[in-house]
Image (spheres, helix red, strand yellow):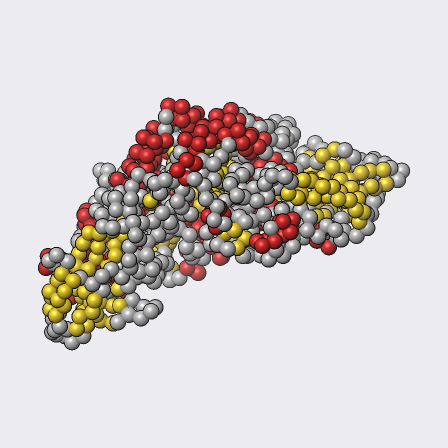
Amino acid sequence: MDNVTVPLAGTPGAPGPSAARLGRRQLLAAAAASVGAVGIAGLAGPAAAAPGAALPSATPVSPGIPAELARRLAAPGLTTAAGFRWWWPHGAVDPAQITREVQQIATAGFGAVEIADVTHSLRARGIEIDVRTQGWGTAPWIAGVKAALREAVRRGVRVDVTVGPSWPAAVPTITPDSPEACTELVHGLAEVAAGATFDGALPAPVEAPVPQATRSTLVRVLAARVVTPGTARTETVLDVATVVDLTDDVVDGTLTWTAPATPAGTWVLLPMWSRGSGQEPEAGPHTDPRSWVVDHFSAAGAQQVIDLWEERILDDELRGLLRQAGGYLFEDSLEVETEVTIWTPAFLEEFETRRGYDLVPYLPAILDLHERYQFAFDATTTTRVRDDVNQTLSDLYRDNHLLPMQRFARTLDMGIRIQPYGLETDTVEHSAVVDVPETESLGFKNLDDYRVMAGGRDLGGRTVLSCEAACYNGAAYSTTWERALSTINSIYAAGVNMAVLHGFAHASAPGVTWPGFAAFSPYYNGAIGFGEAWGPRTPLWQHMPGIAAYMARTQLVLQSGVPKYDIVFLRQKGWASTGIGAPWATNDGIPLGWTHSFATPALLELPLATVRGGRLAPDGPAYKAMIVTPDQFRGNRPTIELSAAQRLQALAEAGLKVVLVGDWTQAEPVGVESAEVIAQVRAAMAAVAARSTTRTVAAATDIPTALAALGVSPDVSHERSTVMSVRRVLAEGGGTDLYYLANAKHAENRRLTRVTQDVWLTASRADAVPYRLDAWSGSVTPVPLHERSGGRIKVRVDLQPGQSTVIILAAPGRQDRPVSVVATTADQVSGNDQRLVVRTATAGRHTVTLAGGRTRSTTVASVRAPLTLSTWDLVVEDWTPGRTVTETVRTPRRTRLTELKPWSQIAGFEDVSGIGRYTASVNLGTRWPAGTGAYLELGAVEDTFRVTVNGTLLPPCDPLVTTVDLGRRLRVGANTIVVEVATPLLNRLRTVTPEVYAVATRQSYGLIGPVRLVPYVEQEVR
């Protein structure tokens, strides 16, 4: 069965869904078929780099690397560069300044912007913009968008535009009473004793409406007997068999009803009304008339957004510019917020069509007040009903919002980039629908939250998973790149391959103070805001081109080819941002090299979800095995819907290896189903369990034993550590493997230590040899120190906390003459079979052992002892406010240091922020051996830094690695070393705006050391 392709559900020979599930995902495959319409070009196929600011070039790479990849690594351009969330104060923007900001962003090496009206900081200080004349969507706002697009097209920068003001999607063309507005279901409550009569007006809603919501529609009036009264923390349990529908008995808002006399006890009377929730987008109003959030579960809601654009925003010029820019319509997370139950007017009809039964008798189980369910039935019924309700909302969000918005975007030659999470909906499925699904580093709890969405992207055939990145609570103007890169490098290891930094702010806005406008600072909820306001108004911008080039190269690697994983977990729920990871894999598999992803039943119906050669999605992520676990979100019950069980059976029969965790003999469907469907689910799971390629284990800890029995091993293996990997494969050249390796933290609060270890990597080619990419300089060099065993290659990695590296396994170049060095007494080995060179900081005899046992050696006569550099002349540009809110005075401050210490401990520098230049003069005398190299060990540095030696600026430096290779740039006699350090603005803002920032502790800025010059010798071995 190695070459069997499983047909899609609904095609001849394929298992179909149960009658109760008809209509659930008919549009998903069609959406997946549009994958190629819009996307960010990686190296899945040849793609020309976008024009724009030139990023630092690198030395030519080895001819063993595919030529297109080599070219783009040397000069990555802006196509795969990171981007910014670009905060605007509505239409209070200057088109000339907008043009300058696009130029600044492109010149720094960033390739995308997302125009977003976010003004929380203004609202917090009582600053009002005249939204009638300068609000979102007004003529000044449109003029600003056009200015941004014109310059972006010239510079090769992609422009994304948020579909409405702030979030969620909202329009000023409706009111809370409009049928297209966000809707809620509110209930009233009265208790009636058994045998007693209720006679009068229906009990009032438990939550009053917003003043603008003046209409309500009675949906149902139900009554049910109480089994167990609720408390402040528990739900009131009702007897589902006693639910009675009294709607037809209501006359002019009054009801007369007598509760059954037996059994004794209490009944609840529950009238329910549909009404507008009156939700506004965050920090409104942004428009006049004010905007209201649309119904994200009805086609009418999405149409209101589309109509607004068609009728009030778009003209011929703007349409043309949007088409040229090739960006995305963007929506933030699905933060539909109501104090009561989320609803949509056609929900009951849609539910019955999609789920196959009437929801009315079960409505009490979904009634919500202040984000807490109020009533429940028996546990099984309650869980199944709530799952069906959540799935229906998920389907409606997909069919009535995501897909219509995507179709509209296509008319503008755009796509949609959306954060499709925030509710208990199938975000995994939605990540397969949208052109670019987006995550966020502030709200996500750990790396599995990103992998959940990467699973949808990969099986949906998409390329990019973006992230609203490097945002931290209370870190406005204090975010360091040491922290940001540690976060970004870690989320890259979880599948993210496009960082949208949070954020870049338009320069000014009414009433702001130095250093200018920022969306969430200085104030946010009465405290220091979150999100750094990156840009030329901060000292760190001085070093941004190097950081941008690093991210552009890394994202090029992570967007190239096709991702490959070891295993995939089938989840009953596609909820995101939960922090719930994969059993065994998260805590025990990843530390040993395993890679994993997630799928939900919807993804098994996608075109890529076929089996060939035992691999699921062989032309995509090529999973070696699927692991099916009980539902972690619902009491670890062995549940699976019928269509998924039947699909899993077909995949298993086609040769997919499966591990079942727990007892699936009593499997149950998801949602409310008939006895017949339950029997079908169990029959399908029994057939899966009976396959020779299936293993059933009692607990998650037994998963590795089952995988070993099935012959499944990881592509990457190493001793237990915090190293994580991503493998992507290029078809070019017979298969080139790109391995991204990071010393990554699973959650933001985890602490890391340096990792130095051997890592085994699987090669697509039998003759592949390893190359190492320095993503900071773009240089690609052979790795002689490696060992081969079968189709695997062992290399050594040395990674500081948060640091990453890239290993490329490619065909040997014609001039490479590769060599395999399995051991050495030296520090490093470079070169090839013709000329092999060792580098060492210690004198004596050094040997190199080649594969096969042959050795080469050399004797290093002497190496200069390390030299401590303790005396430095320091000149700091002290950044302080100028005459305007955006003008900065840069006052030089000078001192001589004989002992390095943070600026906060230097008299007169305690509150300084800016750029410091440390100069050391080093006289190496007349006996500095020719050809001697040296490392510059800087010790502690805060934050970014660059190094100049004798007037030569070295390549950009990784803030996570404070040892810099000076090469052979030192010379006999006098030498000058300059270390330039850039800082955040926090320390200065503590004195400029003390009412906000003085509560923060001073940061330790500058070159802190200790600093040493460590000489080394490079010598050929014979």
Q: For this view, does 970 lie left or right of residue 703?
A: right
Is the residue 960 above or below the residue 1021 in the image?
below
Q: Nearer the viewer, residue 561 or 299?
A: 299
Q: For this view, does 17 lie left or right of residue 256?
A: right
Query: Where residue 870 sits: x, y (%)?
Result: 80, 49
Q: Residue at x 47, y 40 (%)?
A: 89
Quadrant of the drawing holding the N terminus: top left
Quadrant of the drawing holding the C terminus: top right
Q: Residue at x 35, y 52 (%)?
A: 337
Q: In the orientation shown, which residue stands out farthest toward the right? A: 926
Q: For this view, does 291 lie left or right of residue 947?
A: left
In terms of image quadrants, where is residue 145? top left
Q: Residue at x 12, y 66 (%)?
A: 199
Is the residue 46 above or below the residue 728 in the image?
above
Q: In the orientation shown, which residue stands out farthest toward the bottom? A: 264
The answer to whether residue 589 of the structure is visible from this angle is: no
Query: Where residue 1021 sits: x, y (%)?
Result: 75, 38
Query: Where residue 26 sits: x, y (%)?
Result: 25, 40
Q: Nearer the viewer, residue 898 or 604?
A: 898
Q: Nearer the viewer, residue 420 or 168?
A: 168
Q: Residue at x 24, y 44 (%)?
A: 179
Query: Where residue 783 sits: x, y (%)?
Result: 63, 38
Q: For this view, does 894 lie left or right of residue 732?
A: right
Is the residue 180 above or below the residue 669 in the image?
above
Query: How many discs appear?
Result: 0
In terms of image quadrants, where is residue 198? bottom left
The answer to whether residue 379 of the structure is visible from this angle is: yes
